Amino acid sequence: MQLHLKKEQLQASFINIQSQSKSVLSQINVLEEQLKVQQNNLARIKKMYAEGSATKKQLDDIQGQVNVTKQQIASVQAQNASVISQYKSLTVQIKQIEDQIDRCTIINPVAGTVLIKYVSQFEFVAPGKPLYQIQDLKELKLKAYVTEPQLSEIKIGQKVWVEVDATKGQKRFSGTISWISANAEFTPKIVQTKDERQNLVYAIKIDVENDGSLKIGMPASVRFQ
């Protein structure tokens, strides 16, 4: 709200500056038209003076009027430069306020499901503090492990079957291998490999399309097609 009120204040000043600029430009237009008339009179007086039908005083008077009008135009133009400077300054300030207002609106970078909320509505949040955890559940990543003999039989982009426990047997999903670790690691305690004699395994990641039945943290097994 404070930013909104500040923006309204700046916009009011902006309108005032625009009005001043129009007034200054109007004065310049009037003076320029006046200068044109005086310059025409000056040309006519010069001709008459050359012919002897006008006095030196008449020539000096009209020349003085032209000089004064030029000085007035230069003075008003200087005022207009100051107005333009204020105009530009207010434009920048309004853009800064609009940027701050835009930053007050939370926009999710991706569409998804909120998994965890870290703050509640109307709670004060410091800059940089996370508000919630969001995840796109349309596609999940399964982290699996393969033994060294299996490593030579798989590649990135390869299609595999992913199976999870269901009420009636196994439920099967299609998956794609998206990452293969370059380093071996010891078999995690939570993973049961087919060959328990293999102490070193390689981690892989598989992209699996979710129909809504897959949940984060569910155990699954992989079958190579």
Image (spheres, rainbow, N blue to C red):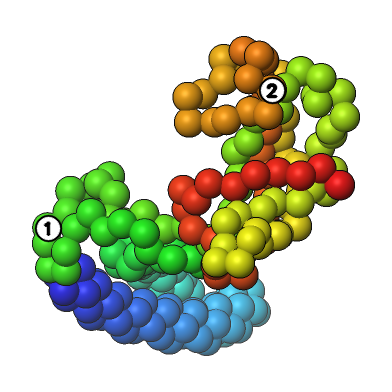
Vertical placement of 27 versus 134: above or below? below
Q: Residue furthest front?
A: 168
| Disc 1, SS | loop
Vertical placement of 29 versus 10: above or below? below
Q: Residue at x 66, y 38 (%)?
A: 205
**For mark 2, what is the residue?**
195
Q: Residue at x 12, y 58 (%)?
A: 124
Residue 149, image x, y percentages: 81, 19
The quarter of the image holding the N terminus is: bottom left
Say left or right for 149 vs 210: right
Using the image as rendered, state which of residue 80 and residue 75 is in the foreground.
80
Using the image as rendered, state which of residue 43 and residue 25 is in the foreground.
25
| Disc 2, SS | loop
Using the image as rendered, state which of residue 203 and residue 50 is in the foreground.
203
Q: Residue at x 16, y 64 (%)?
A: 120
Asked if residue 138 shows in the view, the reply is no
Image quadrant of residue 10?
Answer: bottom left
Amino acid type at circle 2 is: Asp
Say left or right for 91 vs 3: right
**In this rendering, the label closer to the viewer, 2 or 1:** 2
Residue 5, image x, y percentages: 16, 75
Vertical placement of 143 versus 77: above or below? above
Using the image as rendered, state which of residue 102 and residue 205 is in the foreground.
205
Amino acid type at circle 1 is: Phe
- Between the C-alphas of marks 2 and 1, the distance is 54 Å
Image quadrant of residue 82?
Answer: bottom left
Say left or right for 4 vs 134: left
**For mark 1, what is the residue?**
124
Q: Residue at x 48, y 65 (%)?
A: 112
- Which one is earlier in the sequence, the residue at label 2 or at label 1? 1
Count neighbours of disc 1 (C-alpha within 10 A) and say few if under 14, some if 14 to 19, many if 20 or more.
few
